[in-house]
Image (cartoon, rainbow, N blue to C red):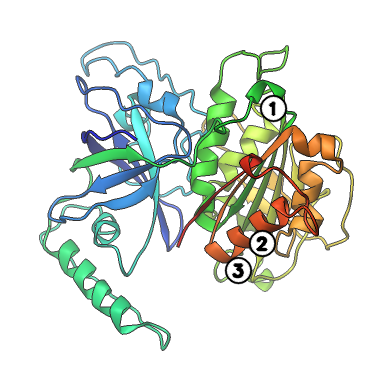
């Protein structure tokens, strides 16, 4: 674990949906390098709040090593924007200019959920515009505990105490965490399949890992063409359906409202990573989409008969990617129906695979138990099943 604190500057805010924002934290010129492994998190200290907030880094380590842009008076306008994530979180109403220094220079990226209990998260969820007052509205339900309500009041008070704008604010950060790529104790050269299982914002560390694989140079883990890893990557992403979606409204589901979905889908669609993405939407209506429910696959033709609709639309971006549709499955992801197939049917296949699971505790515990159980489960070696829980 890195023990030193680093100073970063909040350069760009992207509003993905009503509950999630993506932040780009620029690394100032002359600062010491910030080193981390894909999957690690940051302790983030915001102004006026003594306790740090823990937020997962969603960018690849390579983005923290970018060169700084030339001075403003330089005629060199080359935008070295080669990141695997193409800047989408995937919202499209960010604050700040993502094509300026926030995208050109070295940076760290975080996705932060709106929280009733975290003062650092409440501070980051203030109005991004410069103001002299801050108004915070808190909605409670009958299930809200007294402790959570008290924490919400404290968090709102902490945010309201600082009327300064978010953009340009200096934060202090420290790297930590052991849920990382490459998998400790596993020879990556011997891998034939890597499976990422994400539940909700559990996608955060996994998108850093996937982007890092896509950006890796030719190596023993890359195919002869030099594009992406040699092993297959299966990405199983389960999330709640877009809030308020109604088929009768005549509007398609938008990937831009689903955290990092467009970014992940493009990595498979463009061939930056070999394998496939399978999306599961829960709590909604309708289902399917075109094809077999996978993005990036050319050898998986099982149609599970889950229905058809317009799927999830991923809009064109500034990098020349046209609109495309992401199919989905209108059910929860399961070990028996989905993860087992992604890992492989035979013991030999499972011995050459690793699985990363990140989600809420109940889901994570269930999946890890079934993956490692030698009786009723898949019987995978425990060191080949890595996991992290989020609350």
161 vs 371, left or right, is left
Q: Vertically, is 215 above or below 26?
A: above
331 vs 101, left or right, is right
Callouts 1 and 3 close, C-beta under 8 Å = no
Residue 67, by quadrant, is top left
Q: Earlier in the sequence, mark 2 or mark 1?
A: 1
Residue position for label 3: 245
Residue 131 in picture, x, y percent from top left: 14, 57
Alpha-carbon distance for marks 2 and 3?
A: 12 Å
Callouts 2 and 3 close, C-beta under 8 Å = no
Callouts 2 and 1 close, C-beta under 8 Å = no
Image disc number at residue 271 = 1
122 vs 242, left or right, is left
Residue 385 in picture, x, y percent from top left: 63, 44
Question: Which residue appears farthest toward the bottom when viewing the image?
Answer: 142
| Along the line of sight, the residue nearer the viewer: 56 or 264 | 56
Circle 3 Cα neighbour tier, 10 Å, few/some/many (<14 / 14–19 / ≥20): some
Residue position for label 2: 281
Residue at (66%, 53%) from the top-left corner? 312
Q: How many marks?
A: 3
Alpha-carbon distance for marks 2 and 1?
A: 24 Å
Regarding mark 3 in the picture, which secondary structure is present there?
Answer: loop
For the C terminus, the quadrant is bottom left
Q: Earlier in the sequence, mark 2 or mark 3?
A: 3
Q: Is residue 302 visible?
A: yes
Residue 73 in picture, x, y percent from top left: 21, 14
Regarding mark 1 in the picture, which secondary structure is present there?
Answer: loop
| Along the line of sight, the residue nearer the viewer: 48 or 354 | 354
Residue 153 in picture, x, y percent from top left: 22, 75
């Amino acid at each position: 674990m890195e023990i030193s604190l680093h100073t970063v500057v909040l350069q760009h805010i992207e509003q993905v949906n009503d509950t999630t924002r993506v932040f780009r934290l620029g690394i100032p010129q002359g600062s010491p390098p910030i080193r981390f492994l894909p999957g690690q998190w940051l302790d983030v200290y915001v102004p006026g709040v003594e306790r740090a907030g823990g937020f997962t880094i969603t960018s690849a380590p390579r983005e923290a090593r970018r060169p700084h842009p030339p001075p403003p008076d330089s005629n060199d306008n080359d935008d070295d924007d080669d990141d695997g994530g193409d800047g989408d979180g995937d919202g499209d109403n960010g604050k700040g200019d993502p094509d300026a220094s926030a995208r050109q220079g070295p940076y760290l990226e975080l996705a932060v959920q709106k929280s009733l209990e975290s003062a650092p998260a409440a501070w980051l969820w203030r109005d991004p515009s410069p103001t002299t007052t801050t108004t915070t509205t808190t909605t409670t339900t009958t299930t809200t505990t007294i402790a959570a309500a008290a924490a919400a009041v404290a968090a709102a008070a902490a945010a309201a105490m600082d009327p300064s704008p978010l953009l340009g604010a200096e934060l202090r950060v420290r790297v930590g965490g052991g849920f990382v790529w490459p998998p400790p104790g596993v020879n990556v050269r011997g891998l034939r399949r890597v499976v990422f299982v994400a539940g909700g914002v559990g996608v955060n560390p996994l998108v850093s890992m996937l982007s890092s694989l896509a950006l890796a140079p030719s190596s023993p883990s890359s195919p002869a063409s030099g594009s992406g890893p040699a092993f297959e990557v299966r990405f199983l992403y389960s999330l709640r359906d877009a809030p308020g979606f109604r088929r009768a409204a005549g509007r398609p589901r938008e990937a831009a409202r689903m955290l990092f979905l467009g970014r992940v889908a493009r990595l498979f669609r463009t061939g930056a990573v070999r394998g496939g993405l399978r999306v599961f939407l829960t709590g909604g209506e309708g289902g399917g989409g075109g094809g077999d429910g996978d993005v990036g696959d050319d050898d998986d033709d099982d149609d599970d008969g889950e229905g058809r609709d317009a799927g999830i639309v991923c809009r064109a971006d500034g990098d020349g990617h046209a609109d495309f549709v992401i199919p989905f499955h209108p059910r929860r992801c399961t070990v028996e129906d989905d993860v087992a197939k992604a890992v492989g049917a035979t013991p030999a296949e499972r011995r050459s695979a690793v699985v990363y699971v990140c989600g809420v505790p109940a889901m994570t515990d269930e999946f890890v138990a079934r993956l490692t159980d030698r009786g009723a489960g898949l019987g995978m070696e425990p060191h080949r099943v890595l996991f992290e829980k989020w609350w």
